[in-house]
Image (cartoon, rainbow, N blue to C red):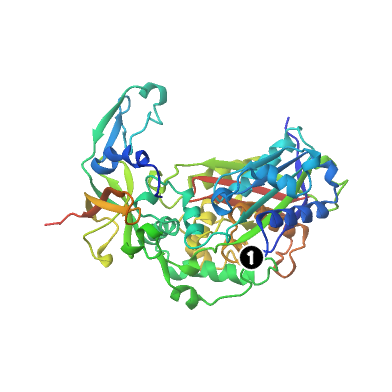
Amino acid sequence: MADGAVPRFWREIPQRYNLIGNQCGSCSKIYFPPRESCPYCRRKSMGKMKVLKLKGQGEVLTYSIIYNAPEHFERQTPYPIAIIKLDEGPKVTAQIVDCKLDDVKIGMRVQSTFRKIHEDGYIGAIYYGYKFKPIEVK
Amino acid sequence: MMRDVAIIGIGVTKFGELWDKSFRNLMAEAGSKALFDSGISGSELDALYVGSMSTGRFIGQEHIGALVADWSGFAHMHIPAIRVESACASGGLAVRQGYFSVASGMNDVVVVGGVEKMTDVVGDEATDTLATGLDQEWEAFFGATFPGIYAMIATRHMYDYGTTREQLAKVAVKNHANGALNPYAQFKRAIPLEKVLNSPMTAYPLTMLDCSPVSDGAAAVVLCAADKAKNYTDKPVKIIGTGQASDTLALHGRREICTFDSTVYAGKKAYEQAKLQPKDIDVAEVHDCFTIAEILAIEDLGFVKKGEGGKAIDEKITTLDGKTPVNTSGGLKAKGHPVGATGVAQIAEIVMQLRGDAGERQVKDAKIGLTHNVGAVGASCVVHILEAI
């Protein structure tokens, strides 16, 4: 998942940097990443998909700790990866950071944070995007 | 009107790290074994189908239909040759396409192969290539690995249903015990529970021995119109049900983490066509690319209730002498998982069981068998139900 032409990554910047999704103008369902049309409303949604920025808060539905990773992620192992259900509805797969491995739990509240994801070696592009960190419960 | 289709020949190569065999050697070996087993002559073949996942990355070769036809000796006959891809379900899907072509009346006899040559690449290339079955932009980009995604299903299954690490490991123990009885298996040895539990962690909660291996291998079957099958063999096996379904590419897009709806829907279609229920299945080959995948499969295919897959392992429901023996071949776990070959090899194993040719791992009085082949993490699934006639 790397060493591609820059536009492949550049075109996803709004989603990966700022969690820009969209909402169906017909049934109000929210999508992330944004979709061309709503899978449920189909033609009724054409031209009615509205851009929507997600707040980046949600809950961990499940997780794993990755010990064997591809080359681009090797230096980060072991690291937690999780499926997060965002408060607006969509679910995403992302790393959990700023948290001890043992403290990652199903049901924990998390907030998105802008981080470096990986890089194409020493001279290649550096890829950024979202990871999630625990929300302090007071 | 669709007509009935029977399997009249099967052929498999040994699975494993086969350094002295090339992609084309493997496919030609399995194909010629299947043709020999069926008793047909090459000139009777109407078409060739082949399932393979990623030859472009594994051996730097595409145009696989023509390549396989050529190296199987059919180039001068100019038969249609079709390559089918659906990640790890490529083989099962190739069988389904071959089935359609015969059922439709367009072809009378076709050969369907499945093949993957995974050890011609080095380093991480094999596992990275398998991961291309995931959503590259929205899963893999963020650091999710193929075992990692299945591991997330396991974590949630443990949380929702109390499934344990030991129950997961027992799937590997069972399948290795079966693999020890299969001359074609990559790992022909039983392993103790402690060895699975104490092997290095790949992606918590899955250890290295919860994962299927990187393998080379090929399998092939010959399909024929059922009313002509007895001209070639005394022991034809009929395909009485076939189902296929898809789902979101990314696991996070699903309604539910611990259910593969693609399995549920593909199974439902196959059961309906066969006019059978899960309890009627005598033997099954399911897609155990990871131990948790077998637990999910036996639940989603209806052998046990949702959440009881772990308990089923404890109760030995799926062992060779259990109520529904699962993965008598050793499964992907011990037989090996050359991805494109897997779905076809599953059919070959069930045919052996229904013919009564499975030797030491024979299930007594097996009349009806099921195969279940999954693409990546359940974004596609193919189910077949077979019956001895």
Q: Is B368 on the left-hand or right-hand side of A106?
A: right
Q: Nearer the viewer, residue B125 or B259?
A: B125
Instruction: Please name the residue that numbered disc 1 is placed on.
Output: B19
Task: In the rendered view, tell whether residue B115 sits above or below residue B202.
Answer: above
Q: Nearer the viewer, residue B387 or B328?
A: B328
Asked whether residue B237 is in view, the answer is: yes
The disc labelled 1 sits on which kind of residue? Trp
Name of the residue lying farthest toward the right? B231
In x, y percent, where is residue B157? 41, 58
The residue that appears at 39% across and 60% down in the rendered structure is A71
The residue that appears at 46% across and 53% down in the rendered structure is B131
Q: Nearer the viewer, residue B188 or B55?
A: B55
Task: In the rendered view, tell whether residue B38 sits above or below residue B329.
Answer: above
In x, y percent, where is residue B208? 47, 68
Name of the residue lying farthest toward the front? A123
Name of the residue lying farthest toward the left? A138
In x, y percent, where is residue B384? 64, 47
Q: Nearer the viewer, residue A59 or B337?
A: B337
In x, y percent, where is residue B281? 65, 54
Find residue A28 and report its image quarter.
top left
The N terminus of chain B appears in which quarter of the rendering?
Answer: top right
The residue that appears at 24% across and 58% down in the rendered structure is A97
* Chain for numbered disc 1: B
Q: Is B225 on the left-hand or right-hand side of B267?
A: right
Question: Is the residue marked by circle 1 packed among few (<14), some (14-19), or many (20+) residues within 10 Å?
Answer: few
Q: Is A124 on the left-hand or right-hand side of B308?
A: left
Task: In the rendered view, tell whether residue B3 sits above or below residue B176.
Answer: above
Asked whether residue B276 is in view, the answer is: no
Find residue A107 and report its image quarter.
bottom left
Q: Tag 1, which secondary structure?
A: loop
